[in-house]
Amino acid sequence: MSTVFSSLPFARALPGTRKVSVTSEGGPPDPLKNVLPGSWVLADEDALKRAANEPEDAELRELNDCLELLSEVFPDIQVEVLREMLFNLSRESRVEVVTDHLLKDKGKWVKGRYRLTSKDHKSDRKTAANKSRRHTNQEIPKEQRFRSATYRAAVKDVLYKEFKGLSHAAIKAVLAEHNYSYTESRPALQQLSSKSWRYYFSNLWTKQPPAGMSDTSSHPLITYRTPVPGLPPPVPYLRQTPSSELNNELYQVLVAPRIATALAGYRATDAILATELSKEEATQAEALFDCECCYNSFIFEQVTSCDSGEHLICQTCVCATMKEALFGQGWTKTVDVGRSALRCMAPCSDEAGCLILSENVKQALLASNEDEKLWSTFEGRITDRTLDTSGLLVQRCPFCSYAEFKEPLPFQLKDLFTMTLSFAKHCGFTRVPRFGSTSFWLLIQPLVVMYAVLWITLQVLQSLFPSNIAASLERVVLRRRGFRFDCQSDKCSIKSCSVCLVKWTDPHICYETTTNSLRHAIEAATTAVVKRTCPRCNTSFVKSTGCNKLVCPCGYAMCYICRAAIGSEGYAHFCQHFREQAGRCRECNRCDLYAVEDEEAIVRQAAHQAEADWRQKEGMPAVTGVDVHGKKRSRAMDRLGNITEEVLRGSGQTPLWTWEGALDALLETVLA
């Protein structure tokens, strides 16, 4: 084996490798510049990233620019729809033609494929200088953009070698469904490969489980070698493909997670070893410190003290107390909100009233392998309690602890002249009638009576239903001032809606974003589970009735079950044996011509799974008692409780008005 590796060119100087030294003007040397495809190189993240940042050709750059522009014009449509429409159009007036089609008949082209809202707000947390620029590389993920011909060919070659048990037609069909993305196509091919008869024959005796996404033990382009024979750890080597973008993707998907796991294990082992050595030395020197809470002995780096300096508490007790305060029942007893500190846990500290200051608490949390989220949660809880006890009327950011003071909401009616103008316009008058005329008295008499009745009615309603009137008044004032709330926190900087508390997107309608987002997620999932894509012309279609032989308008024939190309064999691809009873054929493993899985059950299961994933991603409470088959479901009482059932059986009728809407309309009309 060593003779085989010694004859291969490497990009790093290791035993049995050939050293390549290339320099580039105006930058660091690029070790991968002159490496030929098929060569084994040491997996280097920086070198692969530099090589992957190659400029696109003119045609590909123009397509991606058009895709970016259309994505900005139609932010609610999935990029897949825009990409398909651009791909099937000529170079002349692409953007104009796509825009015209979508404006005339959006539903015909979208077919339920709307873009989902996400809580990944990294693109919103930018500096003021970056906000004025277009971030074309950040708006659309690389997996959704047009891919170069070199990348597509390299991905096909890699997957052909990795999944030899699948036909090339099936692999090309899966690639067409996932825009030739290696990261997204590989899990689908792994699942499809596990159902192949070749997979069962190859694993008949070994009984190996299906390979995971991060499994690289049998990958044809990745191997591990030790720099010094016989000494760990092994170093990953990556066989170069013609596409530098794919090389970097292979590293990020397959190599980087394994390296990160190994480094985390090495750091944990080193930390344990360092702690043991320090404890051994401190024991010999009799320099251990006793925690006055748990009475165990610790080294100096593992203890902290209160503000009096008389009590030493270990970091483990500090972390346990903090978790109990945040997630248990110990907040009132252990936290001093006024000073943002923990009360000392020593038994004799109650009389002294000493505290563990916030600086020491933060240091203890970070030193005990706790992430900063625990400390951020503590800071946010302190801020919320302080604002609650202040009694101020504040506007909070729904994504962080930032808050702003809100001015008191006025409650006064419009003056009689303003109401007269408004009422005159509703009655068809272009201006107020002349004083003393018949039209004036016909207009002013009922208005005076109405004004008095409205004033008395509002006073009675405010005394009987103060909470409802206050909530309606707040909605009216927010509607007049504007719903968008700009968070000024440096760590957040997210624009949100003050009513429905979601991320602000233009155009915005309250509660429509959340409802449509869930509806679109369910519709997209139910469509994708039965959708097939032609690998020749990239046309997506869904089988409604008929047999499992699908013929695309371009002439490409494929199997609906296994996605294999059946243009040459035709119906011979399917089982030809007679069966007395329904079920799988016992004489062959061919696909059935008509029998398919229960499509209704598959669609229902995909819909419920999409709703569960959407709720988890959006941070919303899950639906309780959900059965994947939709039987005996006990749904949560929220606005989104019946969206899934409405999608599965069709949209129901919605009420034309509500009491809240009527009260808001009344206050909007009469309030100043």
Image (cartoon, rainbow, N blue to C red):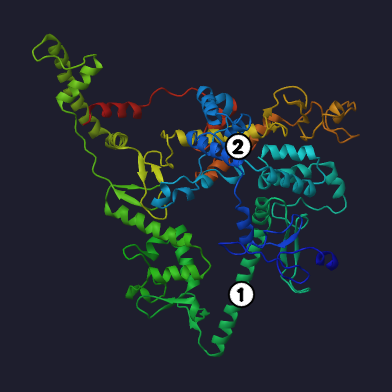
Q: In this view, does 101 lie to the left or right of 169?
A: left
| Secondary structure at numbered mark 1 | helix
Figure quadrant of residue 498: top left
Q: Nearer the viewer, residue 595 or 192?
A: 192
Q: Residue 323, labelled with which disc?
A: none
Q: How crowded is mark 2: few (under 14 residues within 10 Å), some or many (20 or more)?
A: many
**Residue bearing mark 2:** 608
Q: How crowded is mark 1: few (under 14 residues within 10 Å), some or many (20 or more)?
A: few
First reached walking from the N terminus: tag 2 or tag 1: 1
Percent coordinates x, y for residue 441 in the rendering: 12, 13
Q: What residue type is labelled 2?
A: His
Residue 452 to residue 440: above or below:
below
Q: In which quarter of the image is residue 329?
A: bottom left
Q: In this view, does 258 lie to the left or right of 618?
A: right
- Where residue 393 sits in the image (x, y, percent)? 28, 47
Residue 632 seen from this side: no
Q: Identify the residue shown where x is 23% and y is 43%.
A: 408
Q: Looking at the image, is 662 positioned above or below residue 268?
A: above
Q: Where does residue 3 sit, x and y in percent of width and height?
A: 85, 67
Closer to the camera in the image, 378 or 197: 197
C-alpha gap between disc 2 and disc 1: 45 Å
Outermost residue, left side: 436
2 or 1: mark nearer the eye: 1
Task: Give, as a three-letter code, the residue at label 1.
Answer: Asp
Look at mark 1 in the image and give the residue it sits on: 270
Compared with residue 106, is residue 505 higher up or lower down, i.e. above or below? Answer: below
